[in-house]
Image (spheres, helix red, strand yellow):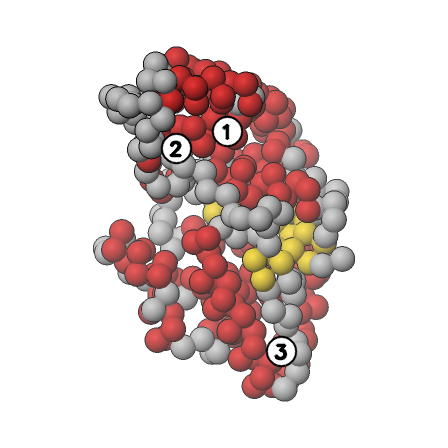
Amino acid sequence: METVVSGIRSTGNLHLGNYFGAIRNFIKMQHEHRCYFFIADMHALTTHPKADHFKESVRNVLVEYLAAGIDPDVSTIYIQSDVPQIPELYLLMNMYAYVGELERCTSFKDKIRKHSDNVNAGLLTYPVLMAADIIIHKATKVPVGKDQEQHLEMARNFVNRFNHLYEKEVFPEPFAFNFGNELVKVPGLDGSGKMGKSEGEGNAVFLADTPEVLRKKVMRAVTDGGPTEPNQEKPESIRNLFQLMRLVSTQDTIQHFEDTWNNCTIRYGDMKKQLAEDMILFTDPIRERIKEIGSNETYLNKVIQEGGEKARESAAKTLKEVRSIIGFTNY
């Protein structure tokens, strides 16, 4: 049984991109591997140093994790900041990371363009904290999207550098993990890019969205004037609509709209109405579970407490070994 680690930032709510990109895999893998799923509230500080309703956002993500199917009885679910061994390992691993390699990181370059007024050290060393999240439990599998592959490669560099320096195989190399043949990219409703919280509220369909909100979002999805020739290639915005439909609709529904596209009779209003209803049908059970779990503070506190205890127990063993190898007198 291999160890799996993965986390989701605590800003905002979970959306369909989170679900299809990661959570549905989490639900399966938790029964096949030793899994640690965490809410990355420390990572969130890199771009939201004073986020409104920060504690509430962490709670929302926890509730939605549980509602989507993560089972705290078979996996470990915890809040990143509840495990003090993570920031200590993060500090230590910074000694084995080079400024040049961190500055060349693609995500760092993207972030400083988007957040030019807040280019903090946390943004620069984000890959080191991500590495600490992974190796604190000596994970070998990490479910990540395409945009995180470079970070994972850097984590392997830090691991190998540490192992080589101290001539001990302390940490195993972590590798990307996915159940399918290729990573899933769920498009946003704005016609380009991926679904995500950072792209704007209207771009994402959240698991907690009411049917009314969801219908309004989908009906505002970007379209064009429609095909002018039979079987012509779809523009990106329309491909995105069909991609979303393939996630939640029946094959007969998808085929119907493929046929109307190919014979130039497609009505985007009808397609978006159908897509909205299929999304509502898909998210209904999760939304009901969000209401049920969200009202049970006793259960949520129990999950947080027990998850933190299990995560700290695993993390403490790793950190004790690292401190001993480095040569600290108190370990």
Please tell me whether mark 2 sits on a helix, a strand or a loop. helix
User: Looking at the picture, does residue 113 appear above or below residue 26?
Assistant: below
Name the mark on residue 57.
Answer: none
Amino acid type, residue under disc 3 in the picture: Arg
Q: Which residue is mark 3?
A: 323
Whether pointer 2 and pointer 3 mark residues with C-beta atoms closer than 8 Å, the reply is no
For the residue carrying disc 2, how many other residues have a C-alpha within 10 Å: few (<14), some (14-19), or many (20+)?
many
Q: Secondary structure at mark 3?
A: helix
Horizontal side, residue 288 vs residue 95: left or right: right
Q: Determine which quarter of the picture holds residue 330.
A: bottom right
| Residue farthest front in this picture | 230
Kindly identify the amino acid type of the residue bearing the numbered disc 1: Arg
Disc number placed over residue 240 in the picture, else none: 2
Q: Nearer the viewer, residue 215 or 287?
A: 215
The CA distance from mark 1 to mark 3 is 50 Å
Q: Earlier in the sequence, mark 1 or mark 3?
A: 1
**83 or 222, nearer to the observer:** 222
> In terms of sequence position, does the residue under pointer 2 or pointer 1 come before the other?
2
CA neighbours of label 1 inside 10 A, class few (<14), some (14 to 19), many (20+): some
x%, y% of residue 199?
33, 40
Horizontal and vertical percent position of residue 169: 66, 78
Mark 1 highlights which residue?
A: 246
Query: Which quarter of the rendered picture does the C terminus lie within?
Result: bottom right
Q: Find the distance from the CA under tag 2 to the CA under tag 1.
A: 10 Å
- Seen at 38% across and 70% down, the residue is 102
